Image (tube, rainbow, N blue to C red):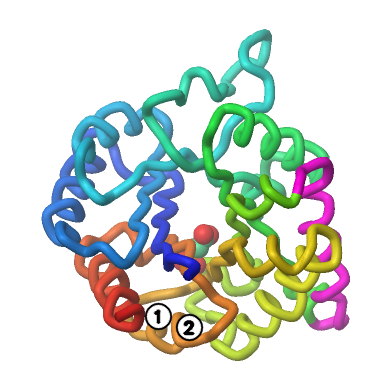
Amino acid sequence: MRKPMMAGNWKMNKTINEAVELARAIRQEVDGVARVDCVVCPPFVDIPMVSAELKGSNVAVGAQNMHWEASGAFTGEISAPMLKNLVEYVILGHSERRQYFAETDETVNKKAHAAVAAGFTPIICVGESLEQNERGETSAFVSGQVRAALAGFTAEQVKAVIIAYEPIWAIGTGRAATAEQANDICGDVVRKTVADHFGQEAADAIRILYGGSTNDKNIREIMEQPDIDGALIGGAALKVESYVAMVRTTSELNQ
Ligand code: PGA
């Protein structure tokens, strides 16, 4: 009942022309795939052209970040009204934003509220560092991030939010969490935290993605896990072959 999602986070890659080319190729290849929500999240400047290219297709567009205010003196930032009619999703609180651009649980929460108010579906990222993992702090830390990100939401709103569990040590390292490890955190920590604070119905409805070195080789095992509803894909989403293979595998599993 939770529709699987393959979301590509293109990060700071692809010029406008390259982005349109990739979007067009993906659109052609996944045409007719109905059992997977396909999402691409290009850099801001690429979004208008990519969005136009994907209009009427089964590939949706997301942003990689967004400010919580609608307008004002925030040099270099982009707001929800600017993204209106261009995106359906917005990635918030990616670990790279938390690490390099000083995002906090508090700003992620403000952004999540602004995104929901604007009608976007936030994809909120959580995940522990290698040090935290080695110290055995993963559950407490990730649970705290989930609680903070969802503070002030109703159970009904939470059902439509997406959480991406992305252990920092697995991002871009080629060292993915094992499928069982990832499932344990997605289920016993993220979904359980949602159940404790918003009830079982919200926990059953919310989609939880895994992210961190997913590719066309390991996606089957990951998507076979009961508490993982999709993937937030970095490197492997930049190539049409690997991204499309991941979508096809997910679609097969969801027959
Ligand atoms: P990766 O990135 O798939 O390249 O590890 C995932 C992410 O940062 O969302």
Query: How far, Cα to Cα, is label 2 from label 1?
Result: 5 Å
Residue 195, compared with residue 31, is above or below; it is below
In this view, the residue in front, 1 or 191, is: 1
Which residue carries the number 1 mark?
A: 219
Instruction: Name which residue type carries label 2.
Output: Ile
Say whether residue 144 is magenta: yes
From the image, give the main secondary structure of the stretch colored magenta. helix
Residue drawn at (34%, 45%) of the image? 60
Q: Dot 2 corresponds to which residue?
A: 222
Q: As rendered, which of 68 and 116 lies closer to the eye?
A: 116
Q: Are marks 2 and 1 in contact (CB under 8 Å)?
A: yes
Residue 81 appears at what percent x and percent y?
A: 52, 18
- Density class for disc 2 (Cα within 10 Å; few <14, some 14-19, many ≥20) is many
The residue depicted at 64 percent of the width and 87 percent of the height is 181
Q: Which residue ends up furthest to the top in the rendered image?
A: 72
Q: Residue furthest left?
A: 28
Quadrant of the snapshot with the C terminus = bottom left
